[in-house]
Each structure stands twice: as C-alpha cells, then as structure tokens.
Amino acid sequence: MRRDPLIALRPWEAPELTSWGRLPMNAVDRRDGALSLDGSWHFQLVPAPGAGSGEWTRIEVPGAWTLQDVGDLPQYTNFRMPWGEFPPASPTANPTGVYERSVDIPAEWAGRRIVLQVGAAESVLLVHVNGHPVGISKDSHLAAEFDLSDVVRPGGTATLRLTVIKWSDASHIEDQDQWWHAGITRSVLLYATDPLHLADVTVRARRDGRLRVDCQVRNASGALPLGWYVTGALEGQLLAQDAEFDRFNAEDMRVSDFLGEARLRATVRDLRPWTAETPELYELTVRLHRADGSVADSSHHRVGFRDVEIRGRDLLINGERVFIRGVNRHDFHPLTGRTVTADDMRADLVVMKRFGFNAIRTAHYPNDPTLLDLADELGFYVVDEANIESHDHAHEIADDPRYLAAFVDRVSRMVLRDKNHPSVVIWSLGNESDYGANHDAAAGRLRRHDPTRPLQYEGAAKLDWSDETVASDIVCPMYAPIEDCVAHALSGKQTKPLIQCEYSHAMGNSNGTLADHWAAIESTPGLQGGFIWEFWDHGILQRVNDGRPAGRAGVGLYDNGVTAPGHRWAYGGDFGETIHDGAFIADGVVFPDRTPKPAMYEHREIAAPVRLTYDQGVLLVHNRQHFRTLEWLAAEWRLVRPDGRTESAPAELPDVLPGESAAVPVPFPLPNPREAEAWLTLRVTTAGDEAWAPRGTEVCLPQVRLGGTETTAAPAPVAGPPAEVDEEGLLVHPMLASPPVLSLWRAPTDNDEIGGMAARWRDWGLDALVRKVVGVERDGARVTVRAEYETGAGNVRHEQVITPVAGGLWIEESAELPDALDDVARVGSVFETVGGLDVLDWYGQGPWESYPDRSAGAPVGHHSLPVDELFTPYLRPQESGGRHGVRRFTLSAPDATGLAVELGAPSQASVTRHRAEDLAAAAHHDELVPRPGCVVHLDAAHRGLGTASCGPDTSAQYLIQPGTHRWAWTLRVL
Ligand code: IPT
C-alpha cells in the first residue's frame, strides 16, 4: 500500500501542526446553493491511525461514532484525562474512523472554486479526495474548509475520504468536563463560488446607526481583475432612510495582487437598537460585482445595531449597566451527543428565555454556529468561548511553545467566524487552562483583530481580581462565595466588572442561595451577575439490557425527565468505563430531555421583569428590565387566603419605564390585620406572541403578603378516648402504615455527598437511627411518649404529646439535639400512610419543589398534584420533592377518603413514594420501586441545599442548630 503522506506526518502528535491545506476561517454566509453531504457514509473503525483496513459498515453524518454502535463507547471524565500520556502524546490504542462516500460534482460548477466544509471533527481530521491528500484540521468545534477545485472534476464523481483520529495532542487542550466522543459531529457541505469571491465580511453596527462593512475580496486565480466593486443593501424600511453606501472599485483602493479590501459605510436613522430584550435585526446583503455589474458573489447577514463597552467597573450594553442572568451551555443532546439541530438549539433557547435567562456562555468551545443566529434572533448576550481547556496539564501547556499556534489559532478562528453576531458581547480565551504566554499571544491577536468587544479569561482574572494587566477585562470567577464578591466590590480596589463565569452549580437537587446571590448583586454596585453552571444534565439515553446508547432510535423514549421502561439516563461509569467521574456530568438546570428542574422556577422569579413590593399600605409595581416598558405583558391579580378561597381580578400594568416603579391600588379590600394571612399574587403572562412564547405564556408570579398572621393556634382538646399507642409508644392509626418517628436525615443530595456532609451523617448514624422508648405517660386523654435516639454525637431526646382534638389528634413534638450534632439534614417527623392515597392538596409554597434556601420561585397558594408528580427524578436518586412553607395538606384517595394534616407553623414537608434509604441505595431511577403508601416528612427544620458539589455550601442561616426544636401538627381522617 502506498504510504499516506498525511499519516506519515503523524499529525496527532504534533501540536505545532494545527492545520494543513485549510482555508482561512471567515464569516461569509455559504448556506445558499450548497450541496449537503449529510446522511449515510461508508465507515470503518480501525484501532490506530494508519492501521490496516477494517470492516466497512455505514454511519450517519453528522453524528459521533460513539453513539452509533460501532464498538467505541462514550466515556465521561471531568478534568482528568482518560489516559496517562503526557502532552503532546496520546495513546497508541487510538480509535480512528475512516468515512468514505462518492459525490457527483455538478457539471455547472465548471470553472468555479469548489470548497468542502466539514462542520466539526473530533479531534484530528485528514481529508483525501480521489486519493489526493487535501488537508488536515484540528479544533473539534470549528469548521474546516478545503479548496477542492484542483482535485475534482465538475460533471464527474469524486470520492471523499475523511479520516478522523480520536486522540491527539489536541485532546490535551480539549479536556472539558463532558463526555468524550469522536467522529464528525456537524454537517458536511460542498459549495462552489466564482473564482472572484468574498473571502470575508466584517460588520460593525453601532447603536447610533453607524454601519461599517469591511469586505475582503480574492480571486482564486491570483490577481484581482480590474473594475470589481462591492455593494451592500440593508433590507427593509431602513434602506430607504438615506443610508449612504460608499462604493469602491479596484482602482481607488489598496489592492495587492491577491487581496482586495472594500469598505461600505452607512448611517441608519430612526434605528431600533439590538439588545437581548429587543433583538431587532436588519437584513444586510453584500454583493461582489464584476466590472460589468454582474454579481460574482454575495453574502447575507443579520445585523444588530448595538454598543458594548466597559466603563469603570460596569459592562454597558447601549450605555446601560445590564444584569447578566446567564447560563453555561454545551452542545448536547441525549441521543446524538454534540450533534444538535437548529430545532434542538431553538428549543434550548426558548426554555432559557421562558425562565428569565438573558445570557449564555458557550462553555467551553464555540457552539454550533446556528446557536449564535438564534441568540441574535431571540435575544441573548453571549460570551463566546474558544475551544481551549487543558485542565489536567494546564500548567505545562499554558507556556509550552509547541502549543502556541494552537492557542492563537483557536481564539482567532472563533473570532473570524463569530464577529458579526450582535449577540456576542464578550470573547473568552477558554476555560481552566492556567495562565501563560500562550494566552497572552491569543489575547494580542484578538484585541488587534476585534477592538470592539471585551475579552475575559477566568484563569488570568483569578490571579488578582484588581490586576488590570492580565488578559481579562472582566473579573469572571468561578463559584466565588457571595461575601467575597461583595467584599471586592466594597474594597475600593475593584477595577473591572465582576461577572461570575460559573456559579450556583446545578448538580442534582441544588442551586440553594441563588436568591441570596441576586440580592447581593442587585444591591452592590460593581456586581453584575453570572452564569449558572450549567444548562444541561448530560445524561445519555441508554438501554439497560445491553448497556448501549439508544442513539437516534431513542426518539420518544423519554418524557418529563423520565425514561421509558428498560432505559435510563447514563452518566459516568455506565458504559463500563473504569476511569470516570460518575454523576458529575448531571449538573444542569434541565433534565437530559430539556424538562426544567424546579430550580428553573426559582431563577424565573429572581429574573422576573416585574416585581411587587408592599410596604405600609403602598403597593408598587417595579419594571426590572433595562430597555422595555411593560407593554408586552398582561397580568391578573390573585388573592390567596388560607381558607381555600382564591379570588382573581384583572390587572392593568402601569406604564413604567425600565428600572422604575409605580404605585398601584391594592385590588382587593385589605384583610383585617388580625385575620389570617392573605397573599397577593400577580400572574404575569405574555400579552402577544413572542418569538419564544405564544401569547398567554406565564412569565412570572411575583407575590407579596398583605398581612394577617400565620400561626395556627393549638386546637382545643376534646373529651374522648386517648390516642392508641403500642407498647413502644408508637402511634397506632388507621391511616398510617408506619407511625411518626423522629427523622434527622435525608437521602444525601449530590451537594451533601461531595461536600462531605453525608459522610458525617453516616458517621453519626443518622441514616439508621435506632429509637429507644423511654417512657409513655397518660394524663386523661393525653399521651406523652419519650424516646431516645443514639447517635455518634450524643443522644437525641424526642418527645411526642398526643392529644385528641375535634376530628383527630394534636401532636406536639420536641427534639433536643446535643451540641456536637451541629449540622443535620432535618429535624422532624416521618411516617408512612396506607396505600391508595394518590393526590396531595396543600396550602403553602408551590406548586414546585422548594427548600429553605431555594424558595423564591414558589408562591404561597392552594396547590394540588398527584403524589407521583411531587417527586423530582434527579439522575442519581436523592432527597427530592420537598415543599417549603407548607401550612396544611390533605392526602386523598379517589373516593375522597384520606387524611388531613395541619401544621402549627409553615414547615418544610414532603410526600413521596420513597423512603430516604431507598433513594440513597439507588444509583438510577430504574432501580427504584415505588412503595404503595406515601412516605411523609414534616420538618421543623430542614437544612438548605447550597451548592457544595462545586462551590460554597449553603449559608449559616440555613443550617440547623443544635438545641431544642419544637413542632406541632394535627392529624385527621377525611
Ligand atoms: C468548572 C469547570 O469549568 C466546568 O467545566 C465544570 O467542570 C464545573 O467546574 C463543575 O461542574 S472547574 C472546577 C474545578 C471549579
């Protein structure tokens, strides 16, 4: 066999070699008239680059081969490399995919320049056409283009061979926290241009209407012909408004023999500027003409007129200090991995918009290019991040001259591709790669090429938040405690905006203290927001029987976050990997099928465009937006009273400018202050169709308390037989399958496990408390039961006083925690009901799951849900389904029988089909067997969730103190 010169170069172990034969990246739109080469290709997987021929099969392009059953499966590692070789080496066992197909080259392409575009290949791409070596490319998240004009014949058939090598020197700088895949993951195109063509177009559009379009013109055959010129048309109404385009032709400008440059200028009047709230776009068509006026080439762009600048320590969009309510987004799909369609991406952005996000960080590489088109259109501020993460070997690589070209190449090609998107407001040099000379080199190239946007890099900023010399215009820490951010802003040393690039780690049941973050951000000049880590739980749909990824055949096999029988959401280790990082891949605010987790409702309310306050009889409506009035919203008032009545009244939103407030009359007669509590909710919806929500979509539910008192007085004892308790002092009750006992434990959340709390709880024995009855006393109808629970940190005394009251029992409890028991999960009662009680009706916060440090998004109201829907199916089973501020509830069967509980004070409560130990013992949901009855927890205190799986634990105010805790509740039969 002839030696393949591309293989002979051993490009997988040559970091200096970033590409060969690849065309420069550009922002010219080439989708018109292109030939799609997506679909089924011939494929073989060989064990190493250049290894002898394997067996041909077929594969779908685009699509990672790791999800297409060809014998190489996904593997998840966070930052450790999946193998031990030191950079730039890679393992000798190196799966290599050879893709082949033939293409009929259209006869009408004769005389044209023919270009192959491979959207993304992971991690090294070698291109051969008709047996000729054509090119090499690296960077798994940017397209590579190759000029095929000399190797294909229009009217003939060409054979394309794309060889993709999985592991390489480049893998060391693509060490992001995600699944390792391999293959061609974005579309492949073939297109033709005139030899005289637009090589690049750079659009700069300011909010004052100034538009500048810089065009680069080339001619494939070398020298540019005389007389070419460029025109531009800004379509729609604005073109009529005296937009003046300069026309250049080849004679009056700087033309070298191969490169022409033309600049178009216009000033657009009466302009609607672009912001994330008002994503106004204008169609621009740039045309390259030959001397005779005929069009040789054209490119379409959607232009948003906006300014981004940093002034002092504020990041300004169109002069306004906007809050960055961001989320980190990976290209992800549970069936197709990193291959995502325009519909998938639109659906992602629609969910983000509906839940109040206005910003995206493309963690940790340039996302699919369509994402930015959609961000322009739907309105997001984007931090566009280069594909550089050398996490495991960060320190060595940051200064390694062998990787210099790769750093500059990756950053500059991202900027060349994405510079015309109004949504992109900040560039990022990459993630978690230490800080070295290679970063400064890339930053230098970037600043010169695009002086219009700030750049950020966490690895540089973290060295000293005040240092203006490092390559980061923004202080963009990860998981910084709220106090540190506030202290920096108050220190007098802040020189740059502080916007966390990652915060509020969303792993499992998490995002505790999000509202506290935002209270600090909104009240501290210098703090401007952050990006939640992250959007996706990256669970891959997996068949349980053979452990294979379901792949494209899995369509429809999941719903509402839950997988069909026989399937599960796979995380690290589920594909038999020995080196993996488990469920750390499941740390998003949406499930793998994009179902929002409860934390999303918390975010929605925190980010709400409308907020209410009520103070001393004055009801204020606040417009929390930066650029819009409330005109696009409709609303309705609701008055919630504990007696079960909810009244509604139409609401007229006041005409209030962004950032301002207006007083409105209280729409209902005020409750007597001695009356029970009353809550006023404003249900805000879209007044018309938005690009991301049809008319009537709920936007937020701000709520204020109008007054009244919350405590339930102890019910009066009644004469009657005393409660029945057994010889152990345990309550015997017709509706209970197991009696109320003390609970100090919850099924550890990911935060509890990784933060080390769960280990302490296990050491103390809280997961398997042993109860010892100490005494049972009867005093008339009242029974007092004293018990002791032994823990590794001392004994806990527990008392229950059970008194018959009208229709049921009044149970007053107390628990005395020794000082050493200084951080438990909960203090409360747990009992189990008989089977058949399927619906929970409650008065309290809801309807979404909420916890003490994550309860801003769940308004007080009368809520009702089937018990099975109360539980949140976090990928790794854990504490779930809690409701905060519960005052009372009924649990009923279809025939309306059941039980009613009234709590002495608003409490954390949960009703599920799973005991804490069932949840703690399971690794996936398919292992859980729901119990026939309900497991009910009533908590006098419940520990906050925090974010300790990566970042700060909850704050002290949400921890449970030792000492005496008291709670009381009534139990009645319906
Ligand atoms: C940080 C990473 O940037 C991100 O990719 C993800 O791994 C996240 O943590 C945790 O899920 S890096 C971490 C060492 C702070």
Image: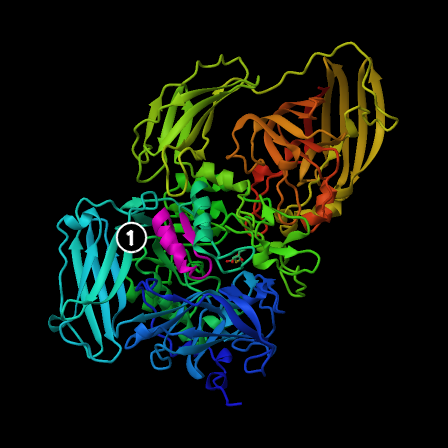
> In the rendered view, does 578 fall on the left or right side of 685?
right
Q: Is residue 383 in view from this perspective? A: no
The part of the image, by quadrant, that contains residue 302 is bottom left
> In the rendered view, does 788 fall on the left or right side of 224?
right
**Color style of the picture:** rainbow
User: Residue 370 lies in magenta, yes or no?
Assistant: yes
Q: Which residue is drawn at 32% across and 56% down?
A: 421
| Residue 208: x %, y % from top left | 20, 49
User: Residue 17 lies in magenta, yes or no?
Assistant: no
Give the extent of the magenta segment.
359-384
Does 765 appear above or below 97? above
Does 690 appear above or below 7? above
Per the image, the residue denoted by label 1 is: 309
Q: Is residue 728 in view from this perspective? A: yes
| Residue 313: x %, y % from top left | 33, 50
Does 912 appear above or below 387? above
> In the rendered view, does 693 fall on the left or right side of 289?
right
In the picture as drawn, the residue positioned furthest to the left comes out as 252
State the residue in front, 404 or 269. Answer: 269
| Residue 245: x %, y % from top left | 14, 58
Amino acid type of the residue that numbered disc 1 sits on in the rendered structure: Glu
State the residue in front, 949 or 373. Answer: 373
The part of the image, by quadrant, that contains residue 22 is bottom left
Does 385 appear above or below 115? above
At mark 1, the secondary structure is strand
State the residue in front, 736 or 163. Answer: 163
**How many residues crowd mark 1 within 10 Å: few (<14), some (14–19), many (20+)?**
some
